[in-house]
Image (cartoon, rainbow, N blue to C red):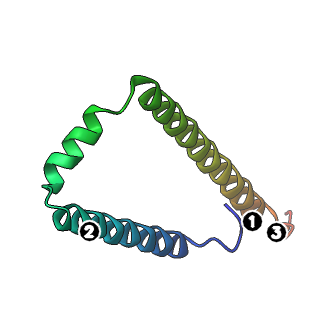
Amino acid sequence: MTPQDQPRDIVARAQALIEEVQRQLERSDEFYRSQGLDPLKVHVVLQAHGSADAQAQARAAYEDDLQAVEQEVEEGRARLAFDAGNAAGGTARRPRMMI
C-alpha cells in the first residue's frame, strides 16, 4: 500500500469497478435476450463447460492474489506498529529531581 492510497480511495475505486462489472453483466444479459436466449440458462451452460484446468488456474491465481494481499496487510501492520513505537518512545524525558 503506497502512502497516497487511503482506505476510502481504495474502497471508492473498488466500488467503481464493481459497478462497471455489473453494467457489463447487464449488457451481456441484454445481448442474450436480443438473441432469444435466457441469460440464466446461458450462464449455467457456460459454467458447466468451464474446464477443470481453467478452474484450477483460476483458483491458483486467486490463492496467489489472496496471499499477496495478506502479506501486504501484515507489512502495513508492521510499519504502523514500528511508527507507533517510535512516536511513543521518541520524546526525551525530563530528568527527575533527586532529593
**Can you tell which quarter of the image residue 25 is in?**
bottom left
What residue lies at 23% left-to-right and 63% top-to-bottom?
Answer: 29
Type of amino acid at the residue the image marks with label 3: Thr
Name the residue beneath numbered marker 3. Answer: 91
Q: Position of residue 1 (x, y in %)?
A: 66, 60
Q: Foreground residue, 44 or 77?
A: 44
| Dot 2: element | helix
Real-space CA distance between mark 3 and mark 2, rounded to the nearest whole angstrom? 58 Å
92 vs 55, left or right, is right
Q: Position of residue 42 (x, y in %)?
A: 21, 48
1 vs 55, left or right, is right
The label shown at residue 4 is: none
* Mark 1 nearby-residue class (10 Å; few <14, some 14–19, many ≥20): few
Name the residue beneath numbered marker 1. Answer: 87
Confirm or deny contact between disc 1 and disc 2 (CB under 8 A).
no
Earlier sequence position, callout 3 versus callout 2: 2
Q: Residue furthest top?
A: 52
Q: Foreground residue, 15 or 70?
A: 15
The label shown at residue 26 is: 2
Type of amino acid at the residue the image marks with label 2: Glu
23 vs 71, left or right, is left
Q: Residue furthest front?
A: 35
Real-space CA distance between mark 1 and mark 2, rounded to the nearest whole angstrom? 51 Å
* Mark 2 nearby-residue class (10 Å; few <14, some 14–19, many ≥20): few
19 vs 76, left or right, is left
Total marks shown come to 3
| Dot 1: element | helix
* Mark 3 nearby-residue class (10 Å; few <14, some 14–19, many ≥20): few
What residue lies at 58% left-to-right and 36% top-to-bottom?
Answer: 64
Location of the C terminus by quadrant is: bottom right
Relative to 37, say whether 9 is above or below: below
Q: Position of residue 40 (x, y in %)?
A: 15, 51
